[in-house]
Image (cartoon, rainbow, N blue to C red):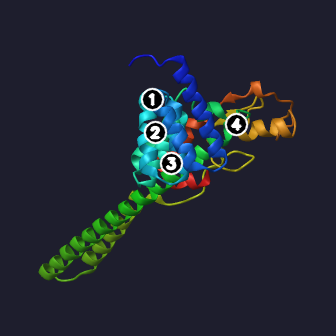
């Protein structure tokens, strides 16, 4: 595509600024028109597409949100807003698998969630992304858990039926005796234990303390360790250092932000725990 003349690019940028002004005044229709004109002049600028997608989001027009975000990502695959709003649009369509995949790209990208914590000006967006992602993963787990529970219960009933039929056949041939009755009861008990074990990962329980921040008591998202060997949630600790004082909240030892080190072992343990126990996303 031929380069856009500087005068045209300048006009498109002025239209973007007009769109921003309209959006702030909640004149969404006018903002969409301004961004659309900017796109017409400079269709290869990703931010024009994401800005218009934001307007469509305000109107809950998720089909158009998805269309504009996909176009923005064709132009700039590192666009945080495009990945985020595309993830939202997919979740609104109950496409949890692909919606979660889009949101997870923000966690593993070079500008991922972990690197935004604390005083970063977009930290508010980090929290919003985490909450949406956690809610989506919990909903996905809840749906899968219900399906697993139904399948396990159906299979258990079939197994119990087969054991009972076998038991009735045995006593019909050999007559009922204490050994047969005891064996049947033992088999049913063992069967119940097997299915209890199979469903154990879906049973809610307390999240282990070592996976939770000592300040918030929530499960870690971005754990960092201090020189004293205590692990905290990065954003919460940075907020403490900024607003309360430059010291460790527990040991009271002097502490500077640059002394914090990512606790990768705990982060990996949290990810492993959440993978096995999706219910724990409600504790984030």
Q: Circle 3 is placed at which residue position? A: 56
Q: Which mark is residue 43?
A: 1
Where residue 168 sits, quadrant-wise, is bottom left
Secondary element under disc 4, as helix, strand or loop, is helix
Check disc 2 and report its element: helix, strand or loop. helix
Residue at (51% x, 33% y) in the render:
38
x and y percentages locating residue 205 in the rendered image: 56, 59
Q: Residue 16, located in which quarter of the rendered image?
A: top right
Precedes in sequence: disc 4 or disc 3: 3
Q: Residue at x 75, y 24 (%)?
A: 258
Frontmost of labels 3 and 1 is 1
- 4 or 1: mark nearer the eye: 1
User: Of all residues shown, which one is farthest toward the left?
Assistant: 173
Give residue 234's mark. 4
Q: Earlier in the sequence, mark 1 or mark 2?
A: 1
- Dot 2 or dot 4: first in sequence order is 2
């Amino acid at each position: 595509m031929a380069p856009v003349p500087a005068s045209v690019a300048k006009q498109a940028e002025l239209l973007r600024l007009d769109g921003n002004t309209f959006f702030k005044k909640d004149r969404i229709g006018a903002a969409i028109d301004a961004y659309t004109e900017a796109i017409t002049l400079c269709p290869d600028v990703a931010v024009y597409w994401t800005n218009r997608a934001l307007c469509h989001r305000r109107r809950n027009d998720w089909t158009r949100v998805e269309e504009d975000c996909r176009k923005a990502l064709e132009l700039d695959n590192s666009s945080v807003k495009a990945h985020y709003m595309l993830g939202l649009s997919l979740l609104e369509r109950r496409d949890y698998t692909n919606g979660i995949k889009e949101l997870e790209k923000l966690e593993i990208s070079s500008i991922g969630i972990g690197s935004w914590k604390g005083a970063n000006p977009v930290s508010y967006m980090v929290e919003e992304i985490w909450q949406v992602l956690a809610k989506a993963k919990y909903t996905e787990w809840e749906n899968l858990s219900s399906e697993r529970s139904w399948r396990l219960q159906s299979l258990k009933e079939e197994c119990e039926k087969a054991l009972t039929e076998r038991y009735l056949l045995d006593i019909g041939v050999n007559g009922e005796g204490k050994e047969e009755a005891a064996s049947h009861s033992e088999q049913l008990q063992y069967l119940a234990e097997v299915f209890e074990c199979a469903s154990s990962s879906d049973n809610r329980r307390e999240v282990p303390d070592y996976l939770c921040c000592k300040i918030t008591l929530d499960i870690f998202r971005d754990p960092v360790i201090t020189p004293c060997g205590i692990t905290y949630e990065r954003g919460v600790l940075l907020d403490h250092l900024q607003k309360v004082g430059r010291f460790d909240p527990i040991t009271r030892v002097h502490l500077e932000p640059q002394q914090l080190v990512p606790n990768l072992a705990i982060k990996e343990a949290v990810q492993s725990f959440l993978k096995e126990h999706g219910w724990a996303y409600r504790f984030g």
